[in-house]
Image (spheres, rainbow, N blue to C red):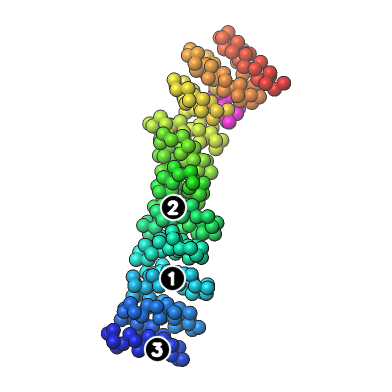
Amino acid sequence: MGDTAAVEPLTRALQDTDSGVRATAAASLGRIGDPSAVQPLVNTLKDKVKEVRAGAAEALIKIGQPSVEPLVAALSDDDAALRWRAGEALVRIGQPSVESLSVALLTDRDRQVRASAAEVLGKIANPAAIGPLISSLKENDAGVRAKVSQALVKLGPSSVEPLIAALHDSRLQTRAADALIKVGSHAIPPLISALREEDPSFRDAVANVLTKLGKPGIAPLARAANGPDPLVRREAAIVLAAMGDVRAIEPLMAQLKTREPDTRQRAAQALVSLGKPAAEALVGLLSERDETVRQAATETLVGIGKPAVDPLGRLLDHPDEGVRRGALTILDRIRSRAI
């Protein structure tokens, strides 16, 4: 055989009582590659004999693009085994399957089809699927959303920038953040770079992801907190403080010296969260000539409260009367707040 004239008898042979004949017919149809054989081969994925099913799957993969739509349609079949085989065939077909699977993911009414489409797209791992997958983070069905998130994680580094961009959308923010956390350390450098954006809501979302990523982000954040970009320096130091890392103290203290009230306020809040280690460093600013800096340090130490008492107490022997007076004032304010 070898031409299209053989397709019809070979298709009939897929129903033969002899499994060997059925398997041979499937293999021959794959070699011929005629699209008219696709639906009978999809039906043969339900054959009771493993070798016949395998032959039908291989044939569909060889036929390629014409197999895609019928295989996608098979994702809605009641037979879970058929759905799995159809999905695996689509994975093997690869890139030609992506567009049809993306359409099914976004538009099919059957949640099982949407879930299966997301799963298959994750296994194919073609970057062309990232946009549809991110759009599907809005999906109402939790099971489908889980498959979408898993697919984005499987796409790894290529999904990071689009997921970060999705943090701008309040409808996607939480789900995009969850996916970024699952992607892991690959997401850290682009997230740190995103801290330079002006939108405070977006920056907060980025900071939240970095905080939840935890230990792998500490060293890169410490470098960024001492880097050349002033906005990234500030935000990276604040994230470090939220993670309880004392390497945030030095860059945050530098920010207390800026002329920008918002920067000073946010630095002070971050230093308060670090408690006594921050207090040990902050008491040194009470001898600064700049009254604005001294006032910022004062309010931060008051905010730290009881953990600042010992470092402030040591200043009562300071040779500068102004420093001693400042320390006493702060201690009185801390005691007043404790009453």
Front-lying residue, 187 or 130? 130
Q: Can you tell which mark lies on residue 177?
A: none
Secondary structure beneath dot 2 equals helix
Residue at mark 1 to residue at mark 2: CA–CA distance: 23 Å
Secondary structure beneath dot 3 equals helix
Q: Position of residue 32 (x, y in %)?
A: 30, 81
- Asked if residue 40 can be seen in this view, the reply is yes
Residue identifier under label 1: 73
Is disc 2 surrounded by few (<14), some (14 to 19) or many (20+) residues within 10 Å?
many
Front-lying residue, 16 or 252? 16
- Overall secondary structure of the magenta stretch? helix
Secondary structure beneath dot 1 equals helix
Query: Which residue is depicted at the point 43% across and 35% down?
Result: 199
Residue at mark 3 to residue at mark 2: CA–CA distance: 44 Å
Residue identifier under label 2: 134
- Considering every residue shown, the one lying at the far left of the view is 3
For badge 2, the amino acid type reads Ile
Q: Can you tell which mark lies on residue 13?
A: 3
For badge 1, the amino acid type reads Ala
What span is in magenta? 273-281
Check whether the beta carbons of the residues at disc 1 and disc 2 lie within 8 A of each other.
Answer: no
Of marks 1 and 3, the one in the foreground: 1
Query: Which residue is depicted at the point 37% across and 82% down?
Result: 27
Q: Look at the image and tell me in which quarter the C terminus lies.
A: top right
